[in-house]
Amino acid sequence: AAAMAAERGLAVATCTAPVNIAVIKYWGKRDTDLILPINSSLSVTLHQDQLKTTTTAAASRDFTEDRLWLNGKEADVGHPRVQACLREVRRLARKRRGGNEDTAALSLSYKIHIASENNFPTAAGLASSAAGYACLVSALARLYGVQEELSEVARQGSGSACRSMFGGFVQWQRGERPDGTDSLALQVAPETHWPELRVLVLVVSGEKKPVGSTAGMQTSVETSPLLKHRAEVVVPERLTQMMQHIRERDFEGFGQLAMRDSNQFHATCLDTFPPIFYLTDLSRHIIALAHRYNAHHGHTKVAYTFDAGPNAVIFALADTVAEFVEVVRRSFPPATNGDQFVRGLPVGLAALSQELVAAVVTEPVPGAVQYILHTKPGPGPQLVDDPSQHLLGADGLPRSRA
Ligand code: DP6
């Protein structure tokens, strides 16, 4: 914290944080204020080389008001979830200092400026609130010199954000206590645990989701008997199974359970009244394609999962990626010249056999998939040391972006 001490002028901290994709889904809160879930969930943290949020938090005695910028545009710093994160990090800082304001520590009464940016287009519809709140909490904690357990704080920004506080494979334990102190994220295995695991994000559209997850899951809690059964009976069993598949690096077990859990989540959406639809005709087309591909090979080589939006996330082992990417390219021929259709980690070339094409590539839909992002499991939030990487300049205002 000494490095962060405001000698005079500006104290600054910058962090990056990852996106995560759940393989046992979180859907439903038992406490909407504290964001306490009705079931535990489990996710894979994605690598920040491909998808990340960067956040700079700065404090100064010269700032006259709290301010927030998201992707270069000023946003509402008074948002209740942003305020909850700020309040909780400051509370931990105060606790750490044992009440007496340490003169070396940054004053908790200074106003703050926060700037946050994604390295991926928001329009791509990739969930960014998890990375966003994980990053906000990490940057604030660094600014105030807080080193305590922070997933409990990130959870109060967005439920799924608590899982972005760790890399690799992460469980969000639902907890039992009404105050939420045991509703935290725990790392199940680090990103190095399963080096062959790869992730393909099939970005299908820039459309905004019809019903946000916060509102959608509340309607589900109020109306869906399937969701109640899922939370009480199905998820506890699946969580144990999923942890074992991950521990054993059993791709078939992992993939099948991930698909089933995604499907059940979307079934609870249909069971919600009025029903919520996140899957589209294209999502169903991708689901059918994955099953035809697996059937052709006689075992589970790819697995899909969908959140509250139409993008498909595909899990596969490294040796399957080139062939499956070619299958996707043939099934959804790029609208333009195909430039940048595959982004992220390099993908090798694969020649498809006649049999594979005949069995799997039925009725191509040109232009339906915008692009494929190739990534893999990655680490948790990172501190950015290089001062040239701060998003706020010496004047405490956003740096003009190149
Ligand atoms: C379908 O974490 O976005 O992605 O807690 O209300 O902010 P709030 O919801 P959010 O919900 C994510 C739901 C999901 C499944 C998951 O990530 O587990």
Image (cartoon, rainbow, N blue to C red):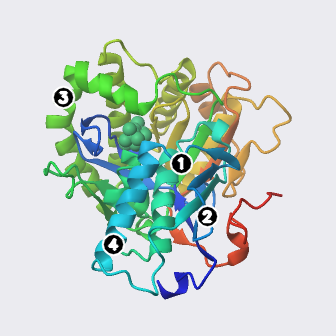
Picture disc at residue 228: 3
- Pick whichever, 275 or 297, lies toward us: 275
Q: Label 2: which residue?
A: 63
Q: Label 4: which residue?
A: 94
The answer to the question of whether label 3 and label 4 lie on touching residues, with beta carbons closer than 8 A, is no
Is residue 81 visible to us here? yes
> What is the secondary structure assignment of the residue under circle 1?
loop
Amino acid type at circle 1 is: Val
Residue at horizontal 51%, vertical 67%? 110
Is the residue marked by circle 2 packed among few (<14), some (14-19), or many (20+) residues within 10 Å?
A: some
> What is the secondary structure assignment of the residue under circle 2?
loop
Quadrant hosting ligand 1: top left
Amino acid type at circle 4 is: Arg
4 over 275 or under it: above or below: below
- Pick whichever, 61 or 372, lies toward us: 61
Q: Report the Cα–Cα distance between label 2 and label 3.
A: 48 Å
Residue 360 percent location from the top left of the image:
57, 28
Residue 189 percent location from the top left of the image:
35, 66
Amino acid type at circle 3 is: Lys
Mark closer to the chain start, 2 or 4: 2
Q: Label 1: which residue?
A: 77
Extreme residue toward the top, this view: 274
Q: Is residue 76 left or right of residue 399?
A: left
